[in-house]
Amino acid sequence: MANVTLRNVTKTYPSGFEAIKGISLEVGDGQFCVLVGPSGCGKSTLLRMVAGLETITGGEIDIGGRVVNQIEPAERDIAMVFQNYALYPHMSVYNNMAYGLRNRGMPKPEIDIRVQEAARILEIVPMLDRRPGQLSGGQRQRVAMGRAIVRQPKVFLFDEPLSNLDAKLRIAMRVEIRKLQRRLNTTSIYVTHDQLEAMTLADILVVMNAGRVEQIGNPLEIYQKPATTFVASFIGAPPMNLLPMRSDEINSQLAGGRVAGEAGLLGIRPEDFSISNDAFAGGIALDLTVEAIERVGAETFIYGARKNGMQGVAANPGELPPGDVIVRIPGAVAPAIGERIRAAAPREKLHLFSADGRQRIEL
Amino acid sequence: MVEHRRLGNLLPHLALLAGVAIVAFPVYMAVIASTHDNSVIANGQMPLYPGSNALETYWHTIVSGTGKTTRQPVGSMMLNSLIMALGIAAGKIAISIISAYAIVFFAFPFRMTAFWTIFLTLMLPVEVRIYPTYKITSDLHMLDSYSGLILPLIASATATLLFRQFFMTVPKELVEASKIDGAGPVRFFWDTLLPLSLTNIAALFVILFIYGWNQYLWPLLITTRDDMQTIVIGIKKIIDVHDALTEWSVAMATAVLAMLPPVAVVVLMQRLFVKGLIETEK
C-alpha cells in the first residue's frame, strides 16, 4: 500500500535520444493508474523506470515515501506483469510463483500458504504442477498475475499484459484485473496502447505522447474535456472529427471574440452528431454526402464527405477545406451511399482547440 | 505408380546398405580379429567368423596389455582417456558457458572485442600453437599430468559461439523477471539459464567428449610416462613393434575397446543431442 510519486522524471539515452521529457505524476494509495499512448510514446520506458529496469537520468521516483532512484528492482517492493508473461519455462506453475519468495528467504510453510491462496483467487489450483508450456495464453496470464500477487507488493506494474490474448479473452481478463485490483487494493500502474482498456480500467488516466504527458485526469473527464487535439483523437473510437476553421468564423459564431491568431480546430465526436434537418441553436450542422457505411450491429458509422461547409457557423462556406466526417448513429438503419444528409451537433458538445492543437479553448 | 515407387525405394536402400557395409566391414574385422589367437592372425589367413579366444584376449588386454611396447594394461589407458575426455568436455562447457553468459548478458567495456578475440581462436587449434602451448605447459610443470592433458585444450570458441547464439534467444523479460524476483546474476545463471541450456549442454557434451577421447597429437607430445598413456596412443604403440610379431589380437581388442565409450555416449545421449541441435525451448 503506497503512493507513487514521479517528480519531473526524465530519461535521456546515451545516444542523446530523449525518451521521457519531464513527467510529474502522483498515484494515490490503492489507485489504478493507466498510462496510454501510441507506440513509441515512452509509456513502457516510464513503467520500466518505476520498476527499476531502466535508469532514471533526471528527477525522482518515490514509492511509499522512499526515493527509489538508486534502489534495485527487487528492493523496490514492486511486482511486474510482462507482455509476454516471462514465466520461467523450466519451472512448474507453483515454482514460478514461489521463486521470488524463496529468493527472499521466506519460510516454506508461508510460501505455500501464499501460493495456494493466489492460485485459489486466480482459479489455477489444478495447474500448479504443470509447466507454462502446457498452459493456454489466458492461463499463463493468470500465472503471471499470480507471481505478482504472492509477493504482496506495494505496487503492481503491468506492461501491456493483455495484448497477447485474443479479443474475447482480453475483455474477460480486463474485468478480472480490475476486480482483483479492487479486492487487493494495491496501487497499480498499467501501460496500454488500447484506449478502451485505458478508459475502463483507470482511476487516473495519463495520456502520453512523444515522451510528454498530454493530459492527466479521470477517464470521463478526459473524454469530455480533452486538453489537446492529440488527446481528443486518441481517446474515443472512432476518433473525434477535427475541422479547421478561421478565427473570425470561430469568434463570430462560437467563441465571441476570445480566439486570437489565425485559425482554430473545431472538434465534434462522431457520437455527438444526430441526423436531422433542424440545426441546434448555437450548434452546428454539416451537409454530408454519404461515402461509406460500417454496420456493427448496435451502432452504425457513416463516413461522409463534406463539400458545402458548415451551416450556422461558416460565413463563407466555400473556403473551408472539404474532408471526411465520421458520424455514429445507434441502430442498423442508415442512409444509402451517395445520399445527402445533414448532421447536427449541439453547442455544448463542441470542442474548440487552438490551431496547433496544443490548447483547448472553453466555449 | 506403385511399382515405380517400390523401385524408387529399393535403389536408395541398396546404396545405403552398400555404404553401411563399406563402413562397417573394417569394424567387423577388428571385432573378429580380437576373438582369434595371435597365431591364427599371424599366418595371414584370418577367418571371417568369430574365434573362441575372445574372453581370454579381452581379459588379457584390459588387465595386462602387451609387455613389449606400452607396458601398461589397456584398462588403465582407458581410464586415462576417460579422465582426459571428461575433463576436456566438462572444462570446455564450463568455460564457454560462462564466457557466453558474460558476453550476452553484461555490458562491460570492450565486450565486442572480447567476443571477437574468442572468435579468432577458432583459427588457432592446438596444432597451430603447439610450440608455445608446449612451452607453457612445461614451464608450469604440467607435463605427464592430467591437468597438462586437459587444461590447454579446454578453451573453445565453438562452444562459446553456440551458447552465445542460444542465450541471445532467451527473452530479456526473463532476465528482468528474475531481477524483480530478487535473483542476482549468479542465481539467474544457476536457476534459469543453466536449466534452459541443458539440451545444448548435452549436445555439446557428445561432440566434445569424442573430440577429447580422440586426441592424439597433444597427449603424444606431453606424456612420456607409461602410466599416463591414453588408449588412442596405445593402439598405435601396440601395432608399432620392432623386431617382433605384432600382437594383433591385443591390438584389435584395444581398438574395439577404444570405440566403446564414444559409441556409448552417442547411443545414450542421442535423443538429447538431436533435441539440443534442433530445438529451442523458450
Image (tube, helix red, strand yellow):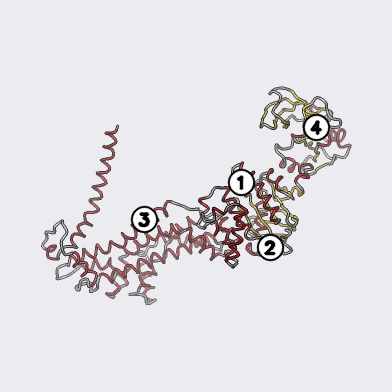
Q: Amino acid at mark 2?
A: Asn
Question: Could you say where residue A166 lies in the image, as x and y percent from the top left?
Answer: 59, 42
Residue that numbered label 4 is attached to: A345
For mark 2, does the 10 Å Cα neighbourhood hold few (<14), some (14 to 19), or many (20 or more) residues? many
Q: Amino acid at mark 4?
A: Ala
Visible in this render: residue A325?
no
Residue that numbered label 2 is attached to: A69
Q: Taking B109 as reference, is A359 above or below it?
A: above
For mark 3, does the 10 Å Cα neighbourhood hold few (<14), some (14 to 19), or many (20 or more) residues? some
**Relative to A272, is A96 on the left or the right?**
left
Residue that numbered label 3 is attached to: B270
Residue that numbered label 1 is attached to: A163
Choose the circle earlier in sequence order: 2 or 1: 2
Task: Looking at the picture, tell me which residue is in the foreground, A242 or A349.
Answer: A349
Of the 4 image quadrants, the one containing the C terminus of chain A is top right
Tell me the SS state at disc 3: helix
Q: Quadrant of residue B1?
A: top left
Alpha carbon distance from label 2 to label 1: 29 Å
- Which residue is located at x 10 percent, y 62 percent? B43
Question: Could you say where residue B274 lies in the image, as x and y percent from the top left?
Answer: 39, 53
Visible in this render: residue B47?
yes
Choose the circle earlier in sequence order: 1 or 4: 1
Tell me the SS state at disc 4: strand
Front of the two marks 2 and 1: 1
Alpha carbon distance from label 4 to label 2: 49 Å
